[in-house]
């Protein structure tokens, strides 16, 4: 049984007839009760389920980063959910059932602050990835105090090592310890976030690196 909390024109909680009411993040909503599933799953549903499962598995490895790096686009949703929506539409290639994630099309951060100029990543000493970039402070919203967002993803382990704000833009370089990925091929990304965490740069894919 549903309970009206703001009168007949307000929100309600529970089930009234065939309608379910509730509140999420302070937003009242109503939806119909789901219909009982009949028949078989369609080909389109199978395709979407496979894409969804692949992308969720990948993005869960860096959900802490996405909570920060996608929040400017996360209107009435979480950062990870917004990242899922974007990458599901833009970063899966192939045909069913041979879908793959195109890591070069993945975004691990999204915003309108400039990324650094000429970013690069190479394998360093054992267990390290060396990042470098050219400081372009003064371009648009870019400032010397912006912090680098670095992400290294290992497909073999389905794990990511990342920072949510490390070296400053003015530093021009940072070394990330990814010792658990030693000997493995990894996918590497860089973005930037302002010192007050309000502005974010859209990430750049730096390619595949084999960790020493």
Image: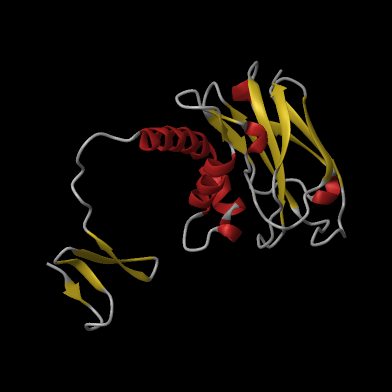
Q: How many marks?
A: 0
Q: Would residue 77 appear left or right of 45 to someone viewing this image? A: right
* Viewer-proximal residue among 57 and 196: 57
The quadrant of the image that shows the N terminus is bottom left
- Say if 186 sits above or below 193 in the image: above
Residue at the spot 23% in from the left edge and 78% down from the top edge? 5
Q: Residue furthest top?
A: 183
Quarter-of-image position of residue 14 = bottom left
Q: Please give the name of the residue rendered at 68% of the width and 63% of the height, measured from the top-left corner.
A: 196
Res 24 → quadrant: bottom left
Image coordinates for residue 158, horizontal then vertical, percent: 52, 28
Taking 174 as reference, is 71 above or below it?
Answer: below
Q: Position of residue 177 (x, y in %)?
A: 68, 30
Q: Where's residue 60, x and y in %?
A: 48, 39
Residue at 14% x, 66% y is 17
Q: Position of residue 92 (x, y in %)?
A: 55, 34
Q: Quadrant of the C terminus?
A: top right
State the scheme by which the image is colored: secondary structure
Q: Taking 111 as reference, is 51 left or right? A: left
Q: Quadrant of residue 103?
A: top right
Up-down: is 15 above or below 182? below
The furthest residue to the left: 1
Location of residue 102 with respect to 90 vertically, above or below: above
């Amino acid at each position: 049984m549903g309970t009206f909390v703001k009168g007949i024109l307000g929100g309600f909680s529970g089930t009234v007839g065939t309608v379910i009411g509730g509140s999420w993040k302070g937003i009242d909503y109503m939806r119909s009760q789901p219909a009982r599933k009949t028949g078989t799953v369609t080909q389109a549903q199978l395709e979407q389920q496979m894409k969804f499962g692949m992308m969720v598995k990948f993005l869960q490895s860096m959900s802490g980063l996405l909570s920060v790096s996608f929040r400017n686009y996360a209107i009435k949703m979480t950062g990870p959910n917004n990242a899922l929506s974007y990458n599901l539409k833009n970063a899966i290639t192939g045909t069913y059932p041979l879908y793959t994630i195109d890591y070069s099309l993945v975004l691990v951060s999204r915003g309108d602050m400039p990324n650094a100029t000429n970013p690069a990543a190479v394998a360093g000493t054992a267990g390290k990835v060396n990042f470098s970039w050219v400081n372009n402070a003064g371009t648009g919203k870019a400032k010397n105090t912006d912090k680098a967002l670095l992400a290294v993803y290992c497909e073999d382990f389905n794990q990511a090592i990342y920072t949510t704000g490390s070296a400053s833009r003015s530093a021009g370089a940072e070394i990330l310890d990814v010792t658990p990925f030693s000997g493995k091929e990894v996918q590497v990304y860089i973005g930037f976030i302002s010192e007050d965490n309000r502005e974010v740069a859209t990430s750049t894919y730096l390619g595949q690196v084999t960790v020493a």
